[in-house]
Image (tube, grey):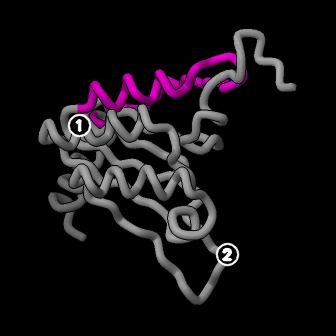
């Protein structure tokens, strides 16, 4: 390799290294025994103006469905992914919510794998593109999993 070409490559690499910005993220952890995660999700959904991507095994919290439908009606692109097993076999409440969302015109992607059951779409994820926020969790988008059970959170 010639000297001038080697120098140009070295200079290009140096510029790329100096121009690179470190990745940073602020983490926020919510615990549904003490935090009302439903309110957090609804607030984020309502604030989204660029694109909303959501995937969940169970979706039975209607306030989340309403927020999703409202964003879609406001012209925000929405991509919602559900699972055939959860919608049609496992949870009638999830089925009702997905049917309601479909009736509102919200596009739904259905995870379907008929040959390898019980492989499922077990994600609980929301991507708020305009807010640069990704939400991952272990709780389904269901009332019993996103908010405290009672003011003292006693399960009886």
Give yes or no for residue 117 being in the magenta stretch: no
Q: Position of residue 72 (x, y in %)?
A: 21, 43
Q: Which residue is mark 1?
A: 71
Q: Quadrant of residue 107?
A: bottom left
From the viewer's side, name the closer residue of 156 and 59.
156
Return the x and y of residue 56 as percentages of the image width and height.
51, 52
**Above-or-below relation of 11 to 2:** above
Crowding near the residue tagged with mark 1, few <14, some 14–19, many ≥20 C-alpha atoms within 10 Å? many
- Picture quarter with the C terminus: top right
For marks 1 and 2 on the same chain, the one whose residue lies earlier in the sequence: 1
The answer to whether 68 appears left or right of 105 in the picture is: right
**Residue named by callout 2:** 118
Question: What segment is highlighted magenta in the picture?
Answer: 19-48
Q: Are marks 1 and 2 in contact (CB under 8 Å)?
A: no
For the N terminus, give its image quadrant.
bottom left
The relative height of residue 48 versus residue 123 in the rendered view (above or below) is: above
Give above or below for 114 relative to 16.
below
Residue 79 circle label: none
Residue 144 location in percent, x, y? 66, 35
- Taking the spot 62% from the left edge, 84% from the top edge, the residue there is 116
């Amino acid at each position: 390799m010639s000297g001038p070409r080697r120098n140009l490559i070295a200079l290009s690499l140096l510029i790329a290294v100096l121009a690179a910005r470190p990745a940073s993220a602020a983490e926020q952890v919510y615990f549904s025994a003490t935090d009302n995660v439903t309110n957090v999700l609804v607030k984020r959904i309502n604030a989204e103006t660029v694109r909303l991507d959501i995937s969940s095994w169970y979706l039975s919290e209607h306030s989340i469905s309403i927020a999703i439908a409202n964003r879609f009606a406001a012209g925000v692109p929405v991509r919602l992914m559900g699972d055939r097993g959860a919608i049609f076999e496992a949870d009638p409440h999830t089925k009702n919510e997905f049917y309601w969302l479909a009736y509102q015109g919200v596009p739904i992607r259905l995870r379907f794998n008929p040959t390898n059951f019980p492989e499922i779409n077990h994600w609980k994820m929301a991507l708020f593109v305009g807010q640069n926020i990704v939400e991952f969790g272990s709780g389904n988008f269901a009332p019993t999993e996103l908010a405290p059970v009672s003011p003292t959170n006693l399960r009886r």
